[in-house]
Structures are given as structure tokens and as C-alpha cells.
Amino acid sequence: MTAQQAAKKILSEAGEPMRSREIARIALSKGDVTSASKDPVFSIATTIEKNIREDRYNTPKLVFIHSSDGRKIGLPSMINISQDASKPLGQTTTQRKKKRISLDLPDELYNQIQLAKQAKLADDDEGTISLLLKQGLSFYAPEIKKRLMEQLESF
């Protein structure tokens, strides 16, 4: 069984989103997955998250769900109705009305938005700004740092 298949099974049984490490712990304890890694929980959790983030090998489909207590993994049916599960995090649906605004930003805020965009939290400037406005920049600071560090390490 793949990590994604095990995660889907566990999430279906739980009926609610869960953190990737918790999913990995349960999958390992049930024998649904195995890992020869030094830290199998980390390895499996990272695999699940990477598959979702890159939308490769994400079968069955899992999604990130953001809540007041952090980012979790869920089934598309668990996602908040206001977020379209078929689109990457931060991308808006075409069915919503959009208003255009123009504003001058302080350099510091503009630079923080550019860092978030570089971390690929969304596909474009609009999606990134929308996401940051909805969730708050401070909520994403640890994730931005983590993703930027991953990019630096890959160089």
C-alpha cells in the first residue's frame, strides 16, 4: 500500500483532517506502510506532503487543509467549501466575483509577499496575496521559511 493510500484509509476512518506525522504513525503501527529510514514517521509524513505539494503521485487525492491549529492533511471532501480542492492552495475559483485594487506597499511588506510567492504557496501574485490576506502572514512564516530552506538545499 502506498503512503497516499494508507493516508486515505486513515483519514476516511477518522472522518477529520489530521497532521501528516500522526497519519504516518498510525500507518506504520497498522502495518499499512513500511520504511527503512532512520526516522520512518518523518519519511512517510514528508512523502505524503511532497506528493500533495507537487501534485505528483497524489493518488488517491489528498489536500492541505488550514485551520486555526495549523496545516493538516485531509480528503477533498473535508475541505472548507470556500477553498476549491481542485486548485492549488491560494488559487481562487473562477466562479467568485473579483475586485481589482491597487495599493502602495511598504518595501518590507512587499518583500515578504515576494518571499511567499517564491515559496510557491500559490501559482501567482494574486493567489499569493489572497492567501496571505485570508490566513495572515504570520501564520505562514514557518512554512515560508521551511520551503525556502528546501529550495536552498536543493541547489
Image (cartoon, rainbow, N blue to C red):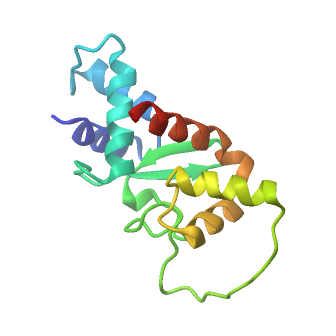
Measured as percent of width and height from the top left, residue 95 is found at 49, 87
Where is residue 146, by image quadrant? Answer: top right
Please identify the quadrant where the C terminus is shown.
top left
Of 44 and 33, which appears nearest the observer? 44
Q: Residue at x 47, y 84 (%)?
A: 94
Could you tell whether 90 is left or right of 100 in the image?
left
Q: Residue at x 39, y 41 (%)?
A: 49
Of 147 and 73, which appears nearest the observer? 147
Of 152 and 92, which appears nearest the observer? 152
Could you tell whether 1 is left or right of 61 in the image?
left
Please identify the quadrant where the N terminus is shown.
top left
Task: Tell which residue pokes out farthest to the top in this image.
Answer: 38
Count of number-bearing discs: 0
Q: Residue at x 43, y 62 (%)?
A: 88
Measured as percent of width and height from the top left, residue 120 is found at 49, 54
Where is residue 43, by image quadrant? Answer: top left
Residue 25 in view here: no
Of 151 and 99, which appears nearest the observer? 151
**Looking at the picture, does residue 86 appear above or below residue 42?**
below
Q: Residue at x 67, y 58 (%)?
A: 113
